[in-house]
Image (cartoon, rainbow, N blue to C red):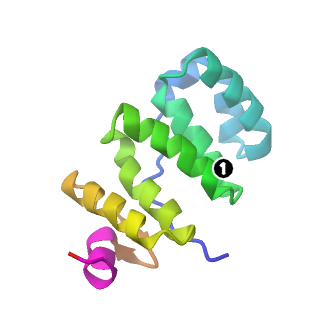
Amino acid sequence: MKYYYITSLILLGLSSCTQNQESCSSFDKNDVKQSIPVLEKYINENPNNLDSLNKMAMNFYKLGNLEKALYYYNIIADANSEYNCVEASKGVCLLLLGKKEDACVSFHKAMKQNCDLNIIEGKNISEYVNENCLK
């Protein structure tokens, strides 16, 4: 499977680390598998914490589980479509899942939010859209 760079996935969540140090230290150690159950528990108790949802999405992306990553990105986008350039992250997952048209929709949304990040084979979103998406 070909992977793309996702620079929009920045670890924000510092405020949630003070509330949930166990998941943050687990995540900071890059022990992705270990952090998932901890994050699941925290998300069940705090379903509106976008930082934790984003960390969960990033974990599943790192594990190559793009459907699960997309599931969490969709939750974030439904709550706040401008959070941490989530539409760019959704677009990359959709693209890797072979859903090019849906990816283009997400990339267009990301561009409208000034999230024209360098994410795909050294190209930024606008370059990808101009070369690959219908206008």
Number of marks in picture: 1
* Above-or-below relation of 123 to 51: below
Q: Residue furthest bottom?
A: 131
Residue plotted at (49% across, 45% down): 73
Tell me if residue 100 is in the magenta stretch.
Answer: no
* Above-or-below relation of 74 to 22: below
Looking at the rendered image, the quarter that the N terminus falls into is bottom right
| Residue 128 as seen in the image, left or right of residue 35 | left
What percent of the width, then of the height, locates residue 133? 30, 77
The span picked out in magenta is 125-134
What percent of the width, then of the height, locates residue 62? 66, 56
| Residue 95 as seen in the image, left or right of residue 40 | left
What percent of the width, then of the height, locates residue 94? 49, 63
Tell me if residue 132 is in the magenta stretch.
Answer: yes
Residue plotted at (76% across, 31% down): 37
Question: Pointer 1: what residue?
Answer: 60
The answer, for residue 31, to whether it is visible in the render is: no
What percent of the width, then of the height, locates residue 93? 52, 61
- Give whichever of 19, 80 is nearer the camera: 80
- Answer few, some or many: residues within 10 Å of disc 1's Cα (few below 14, many 20 plus, some between 14 and 19): many
Looking at the rendered image, the quarter that the C terminus falls into is bottom left
